[in-house]
Image: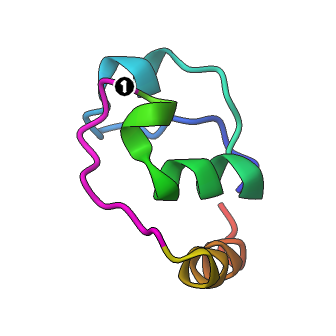
Amino acid sequence: MGRTVGNLDKFKYSKDLAASNDVWTPALLDQWLTKPKAVYPSTYMLYKQPDAAIRADLISYISTFKD
């Protein structure tokens, strides 16, 4: 959370993620987890989570990590 999308070294990002200047926020992560290709069309991410409660739990958990 709070980190620029697609910016970790030694990780292969799709072109949309690599070119993005977006910053991960709870709202952006919620969109991403709902339908990744709607947010970044060239993404390799196939996981989708239609359940809002599960997404909220995932976002809450991810928000506990610090760089």
Type of amino acid under label 1? Pro
Name the quadrant containing residue 18.
top left
Q: Is residue 25 visible?
A: no
Q: Is residue 6 left or right of residue 45?
A: right
Q: Position of residue 64 (x, y in %)?
A: 71, 79
Q: Position of residue 52 (x, y in %)?
A: 61, 74
Name the quadrant containing residue 26.
bottom right
Q: Is residue 52 magenta?
A: no
Q: Main secondary structure of the magenta part?
A: loop
> In the figure, 65 relative to 32: above or below?
below
Name the quadrant containing residue 22.
top right
Q: Position of residue 20 (x, y in %)?
A: 55, 20
Crowding at dot 1, Cα within 10 Å, few <14 / some 14-19 / many 20+, comes out as: some
Q: Position of residue 11 (x, y in %)?
A: 29, 40
Query: Is residue 45 or residue 5 the one in the foreground?
Result: 45
> In the figure, 61 relative to 4: above or below?
below
Query: Is residue 40 or residue 66 the one in the foreground?
Result: 40
Query: Is residue 48 or residue 9 the one in the foreground?
Result: 48
Residue named by callout 1: 41
Residue segment shown in magenta = 41-50
Residue at 48%, 14% (x, y): give it: 19
Scheme by which the image is coloured:
rainbow
Q: Is residue 43 magenta?
A: yes
Secondary structure, mark 1, is: loop
